[in-house]
Amino acid sequence: MSEFKNIYDAHLALKNKKISAKELCVEHIKVAKENKNNTFITLTEDFALEKAKKIDEKGINNHLDGIPFSLKDLFITKNIRTTAGSKMLYNYIPPYEGTTSDNLQDAGAVLIGKVGCDEFGMGSSNENTPFGPVNLPINNDYLPGGSSGASAVSVLEGSSLFSMGTDTGGSVRLPANFCGLVGYKPTYGRVSRYGQIAYASSLDQASPFAKTPLDIAMIMDSITKNDEKDSTQAPIGAMNSASKILNNTDKDLKMTIGIDRSMIEGCREDVRDSLNQSIKELEKKGVKFKDISLPHLKYSVAVYYVIATSEASSNLARFDGVHFGYSSKNGKDLEDSYALSRSIGFHEEVKRRVLLGTFCLSSGYSDEYYSHACKVRKLIYDDFQKAFKECDYVYSPVCATTAFRKDEILTPLQMYMNDLYTIPVNLAGLPSMAIPYGKSSLNSLPTGFQLIGNSFKDEELILDGHKVFEVLK
Ligand code: GLN
C-alpha cells in the first residue's frame, strides 16, 4: 500500500522529488495486480509506465501530474478495452477517447486501468455483472456498493489515488459512503458526458471518488472544461476550486443547512446515531441547522425507475449485435439474431430494465408513466428550490444502512429501495458531496452523510464540504 494518503500528499512528494512518477505508478500497479478484491477488468500497465516516464521527463506542474487513477469501465478510452461491465461489449476496443479520460490525462494523471461495475451502471451492489462481484476491502463478507463500487475499492485498496465513476441515481455516493470515501456528484450539465456509455441520459454524470474534498477539487478543476462535443454541458468554463481551498485561511463554518428530520428517522439505528452525532458536532462548530420539509421525495424511487428505465431502453437499443455489441451467429433471420444477441449479451438486471422501460414508453402508456413521472420530477425539484430559499445546503443520509453483506439483498425491489436518499439529487439535477463520518456501532463499517447544494453551486459546495470534512475528521 502506498505511503501517500491522498492526491495532495503524493503531489507534494512528486514536486519535491521524494518519489518519481514512475515509482508511484509501479507501487499502485503492484496493488492492482495482487487483485485481492476483483477490482480491475483491464490493467493498462505499459500505457501507464510510458505516461509516467513522460511526466518525469516533463516535470511536475499540475496537481494531477503523475497521479495514478482508474476509470469505471463505462468511460470510453481510445485503443483500451471498454466493456461497460457487460458481456455485450466484452471485446470492444473504442476508436476514440471520451472527454473525461482525455481531460484527466491531459492534466497529467496516469491511467492504471479500467475497473468493474454493475453492467451499464445498473445496480447498487456491484453484483450485476459477468465479471463477478467486487469485495469490500475492510471486510470481504461485504460488498462496496454499486454501481461504481470497484472505483471506490481501487481508492480504498491503494491501487489508485482517485477514481472516476458515474452517478445516475447514487452510484458514486453510495459506494463512497460504504467505503468511507468522499464521493462527488456534480450538477447535471457541469461535466461532459461525451464518451461515457449512456444509461439514463437526463441523470448520468461523471463523478469522482477520492479521500478528501481537496482531492475532489483537483479532479473537478480538470474535468469541467467546456466541451463542444456535449451540448448538455453548460459552457461556463473550468472550476478553480483547489487553489481557493489551499489559499483560504477562513475556517468559519458560516452556513445554514436544511434538514428534513423524517429522512433520518427512516435510517437503521446505528446509522441514525451516527448521523445525529455528526449534526451535534457541526452545531458545536457553528453550523446552523434549519428544519425544512421535502414532501415529494417519497415518490423519488418510483419516478426514477420509470425515467431511468425508459431512457435506458432507448439508449440500449443500439446494442443489437449489428450496430454494436455481441453478435450471435445462430439467428434464423435478422429478427431472431437481434433477439439472440440481446438475450445472451445482456445480464438479467439489464433485461429487466429494458423490458420495464419499453413498457413505460409504449404507445398508450407513455403519458400514464413517463410523462407523469416527469411531472412529479418537477415537484421534487421544486421542493429543493423552496428549501434553498431558507438554507445553503440540504443535509441527507446517503443510505439507511451500512454496506450490504454478500447474501443480504434478495430481491430487485429491495435493491431499488436503497437508492431512496441518493435518487432525488439526480432527479433534481443538483450537486451533492458524500462525506464520511464515523463508524456503525453494529458492524464497525463506515457511515456518513451527504451535503446537497443548489444547481451550479459546485464550487461553493466543494469549498464548504472541505471545511465540514476537516472539522469532523
Ligand atoms: N442504483 C441505481 C440504479 O441501479 C443507481 C445507479 C447509478 O447511479 N448508476 O439505477
Image (cartoon, rainbow, N blue to C red):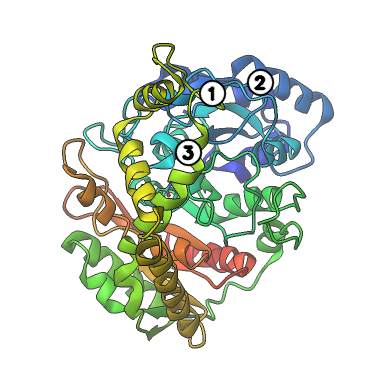
Q: Where, quadrant-wise, is the C terminus in this rendering?
A: bottom left
Badge 1 local density, few (<14 within 10 Å), some, or many (20+)? some
Pointer 3 residue: 316
- Within 10 Å of disc 2 (Cα), the crowding (few <14, some 14-19, many 20+) is few
Find the distance from the CA under tag 2 to the CA under tag 3. Answer: 22 Å
What kind of residue is marked 3? Answer: Leu
Residue 323 in which image quadrant: top right
For residue 227, which numbered disc appears in the image?
A: none
Q: How many numbered badges does the structure rendering display?
A: 3
Image mark for residue 322: 1
Q: Nearer the viewer, mark 1 or mark 3?
A: 1
19 to 246, vertically: above or below: above
Tell me the kind of residue under disc 2.
Asn
First of labels 1, 2 by sequence position: 2
- Element assignment for label 1: loop
The residue indicated by pointer 2 is 79
Q: CA distance from mark 1 to mark 2?
A: 21 Å
Q: Position of residue 43 (x, y in %)?
A: 53, 20
Q: In the displayed structure, would residue 7 be above or below residue 21?
A: below
> Disc 1 vs disc 2: Cβ atoms closer than 8 Å?
no
Is label 2 in contact with label 3 (beta carbons under 8 Å)?
A: no
Q: Is residue 436 visible?
A: no
In the picture, measured across the screen, residue 114 lies left or right of residue 85, that is right
Q: Is residue 201 above or below residue 348?
A: below
Question: Residue 249 location, x and y as percent?
Answer: 66, 69
Residue at disc 3, secondary structure: helix
Q: Crowding at label 3, few (<14), some or many (≥20) Cα neighbours within 10 Å?
A: some
